[in-house]
Amino acid sequence: MTQPMTLAEKILAAKVGRDVVRPGELLEVPVDWVLAHEITTPVAIRMLEERDMDRVWNPERVVAVPDHTVPAKDIASARLYQRLKAWVQKHGIKHWYDVGRGGIAHTVFEASGLPAPGEVVVSGDSHTPNAGALGMFATGVGSTDLAGAIYAGTFWLKVPETLRIDLVGELQPGVYAKDIILEVIRRIGDDGARSMAMEWGGPGMATLSMEERFTLTNMAVEAGGMTGIVAADDVTQAYLREKGTPEERWRIFEPDPDAHYAERIEVNLSELEPVVAFPNRPGNGHPISDARGIRIDQAYLGSCTNGRISDLRIAANILRGRRIADHVRMIVVPATQAIYKQALREGLIEVFVEAGATVSYPSCGACLGMHTGVLGPDDVCISSTNRNFTGRMGHPSAQIYLASPAVVAASAVAGEITDPREFLTETATQLSA
Ligand SMILES: CC(C)[C@H](C(=O)O)[C@@H](O)C(=O)O
Ligand code: SF4
């Protein structure tokens, strides 16, 4: 009999060929994927070059997606892009998603058909846990560990403790996955899951789509977590089939019922209300009623947290036939080119444009204040992104409120932070679609 393990422990044990691993143990873990973008990967590449170690352990297992400032916004970003691309060409990196064919690395990766349950992915990006929703171990690493993973196909990891989050009930119309994660971070605090795996489950999980689950695991780092993870179930398997992930690669693990958790919390989805994270911490969540009437200058819809097709649909259902308030600028950034194309086919882009929004090209956009909607002094922004730290999206005096795409769209129309449930009329069923 092996000892009971959490989901993260099971995946890691299988990866290192052991029966059991325990929190706190240091392991050299083989990776299945390295996800590379143009900000941190060039740093790792330079480290390897300087040591005469410029090799890639497996060019078929690197997914390279320039995303933060593409198309280049200045000469410095053009150089970063060039360095990534030159490396991709030199080493014959197989999965290269160039500008116009990619988008945000995490979102491209999740839908690429490449990752499978039971696998391990690392990237020099803190939102790598996004892919954990597929039942894999996904974590962000620093440039040195990234260099090591590129060179050797392994990285050193301290097995994390696990925080278990049980979902019960079902989301009510106008309430979304973003509200769940903002509520969890509000409850446990901005470092409430420090260095832990956040394992999501419970009977409510079956009611959430894959896109909703990615929103949950995406923001693990906003609670200090090392990763977020969801056991692969029927919803996951249907998604993997749709994306064409070869079934022989799936390794589906479940946490043991008597696994040891550092902490366990429950969220009742049926009782959840829209949550808004006030400046300047993702954990500064408030019920939307507290935010009512806060006048906004910008409404931003995009990012690896909430720039998916379902997010665009939710926003478009609110904006259809309406105009955004005169004093507001709304910026919509589909997370990937595939999402952009789908949104075009569905007529969503037309809805945004008719409503008076600007639709921008797939990229990280204004999420980290580098381009496509940088905030000026004292600007107030309602945003579907994941971080509202001082200066995150531009000027340090700008105020960022984090919320669901529905809140972003409803607020853009009203000109102030607004409960999307006020827009729930005859389109109630569409809103929750
Ligand atoms: C630039 C990158 C390293 C950074 C991260 O690691 O998360 C960015 O994506 C962010 O969201 O702040
Ligand atoms: S969209 Fe934002 S959070 Fe996601 S990777 Fe890009 S900058 Fe980071």
Image (cartoon, rainbow, N blue to C red):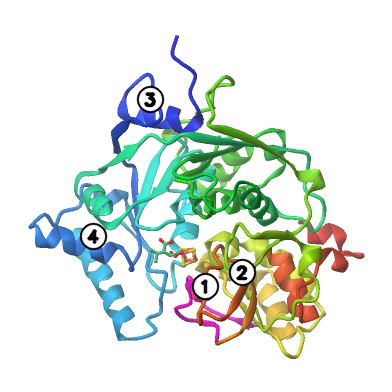
Image: 365 above or below 11: below
Where residue 240 sits: x, y (%)? 53, 43
Task: Please tell me whether residue 156 belongs to the stretch shown in magenta.
Answer: no
Task: Please tell me whether residue 371 belongs to the stretch shown in magenta.
Answer: yes
Q: Which mark is residue 279?
A: 2
Location of ligand 1 given as a quarter of the image = bottom left
Q: Which mark is residue 294?
A: none
The amino acid marked with disc number 2 is Pro
| 2 or 3: tag closer to the N-terminus | 3
Gap between marks 4 and 1 measured at Cα: 28 Å
Q: Secondary structure at mark 3?
A: loop
- Quadrant into which the N terminus falls: top left
Gap between marks 1 and 2 measured at Cα: 8 Å
Q: Residue furthest right?
A: 426
Exactly how many numbered labels are in the figure? 4
Gap between marks 2 and 4 measured at Cα: 33 Å
Where residue 171 sits: x, y (%)? 77, 48
Q: Nearer the viewer, mark 1 or mark 3?
A: 1
Q: Which residue is mark 4?
A: 44
* Viewer can see residue 88: no
Q: Secondary structure at mark 4?
A: helix
Q: Which residue is mark 1?
A: 390
